[in-house]
Amino acid sequence: MIELLWSIFDITLVLILLALAWTTCSTQDVMRAVTLFIAMGLLLAIVWARLKAPDLALAEAVIGAGISGALLLSAIRDYPSTSMVTHRSRLTEGIINSLTLALMILMSWAAWHGLNMSDGVRLSEQVNSQLPVSGVSNPVTAVLLNFRAYDTLLELAVVLTAVLTVLTLNEKRADHEASSPLLQGMTRWLVPLLVVTSGYLLWVGAHAPGGAFQAGAMLAAAMILLQLAYPSRRQAFNNHLLKILLVIGILTFMLVGLWMMSLNDDFLAFTPAWAGTLILIIEAAATVSIATALTLAYIGGRPIGWEGVGREDTHRTNRSIIENGGAE
Amino acid sequence: MISEQLLYSLAGIGLFGIGLRATLLHHMLLPRLLALNVCGAGVFLIFIAIAYGGVEIMADPVPHALVLTGIVVAVSATAMALALGRRLEALNDE
């Protein structure tokens, strides 16, 4: 009986997910497409929870649905003429449809075959056997920051590169008009709550679902909310500090890695006795960097006075640019 | 257990297909990015469905870590694509 109910739940979830994906991709209105995409992200978070991946459920709810949603919604303004109508000829459409269908059938066969063949090697046993020396008891955090720390370091580099590209290409978007007092009042309540939740997620990541990515995204959500509620307020951080915050995660990660290399002969090979503390230090720095990166990505370009010497004084910055330009 | 893995893997393949088809069909940047994100979500779903081992067995944490990384990289890549598109739009206006 219980199993039947689970099957009904699974099938309903999958059908709604596919329906949302289909409407996201085929609706005529961009605004509607983005809204449906956010809804799909939230549903995916439920799917992750169902498939016993609570870390992913947290990350998807904050990043996949929250931050990407905010990013895409604010990007709609940049493309006033966008329409979702396609102008492909019947022939092209037919070719695309049949090729996609063929690929899907092939993939389904591969999935069916692969799942029926054998149990295969499950890496979870290896992870479990090494978990006591990893310094943390949440297996996902252990994989991310101890066993596969290289991947995570490089991932931080990817995020940094993406944000640097964003900063190189554009100025910050023009501010929208001041928002309603309702949002401002709610923000006063929500932001401290978000900051506390972020700190909690960072701390709890050692032994339960959570960690640097979820915490960083939560912090970025708080910053985006502040940006939305008080658009004309002068930015609280000066740009010099912002630059340091952007790279502190990767810097700490590399310094710890090099320090461990001098002790254990291997880059990022943690001494088991210190691993827990080191992971917490790296995660704290990474949280700050991820939050800064995602906030800057949302803003969509350089904040005012970015090229200057780090002072927010725009007048002075402008003068120094002119002087530099003249000297060249 | 196999049936749940298979069901969610097929759902992932479905998402992938829907996203891929729309990515190829659309002309404009924003709809294409949305479709590409749907496509990516499908790949994540296939990964996690295979990592799921049943009610009493612990799910495989390695794919979870990979997909967590993937989600963060996907949002960064989306932000980068949007910035490139915005720059292109600005250049076209000039």
Image (cartoon, coloured by chain):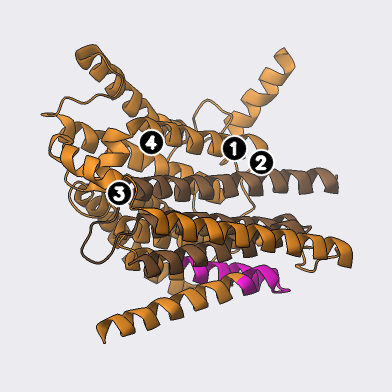
Chain colours: A orange, B brown
The percent position of residue A312, horizontal first and vertical second, equals 51, 36
Residue under circle 1?
A167
The local crowd at label 1, few if under 14, some if 14 to 19, many if 20 or more residues have their Cα within 10 Å, is: many
Measure the alpha-carbon separation of dots 3 and 4: 15 Å
The local crowd at label 2, few if under 14, some if 14 to 19, many if 20 or more residues have their Cα within 10 Å, is: some
**Residue A152 tag number:** 4
Give the chain letter at badge 3.
B
Measure the alpha-carbon separation of dots 4 and 2: 28 Å
Instruction: Tell me the amino acid under the disc marked 2.
Output: Asn
Measure the alpha-carbon separation of dots 1 and 2: 6 Å
Residue under circle 2?
A170
- Residue A141 in sight: yes
Q: Is residue A126 magenta?
A: no
Kindly indicate whether the residues beneath marks 4 and 2 are on one polypeptide chain: yes
Residue under circle 3?
B61
Measure the alpha-carbon separation of dots 4 and 1: 22 Å
- Residue A213 in sight: no
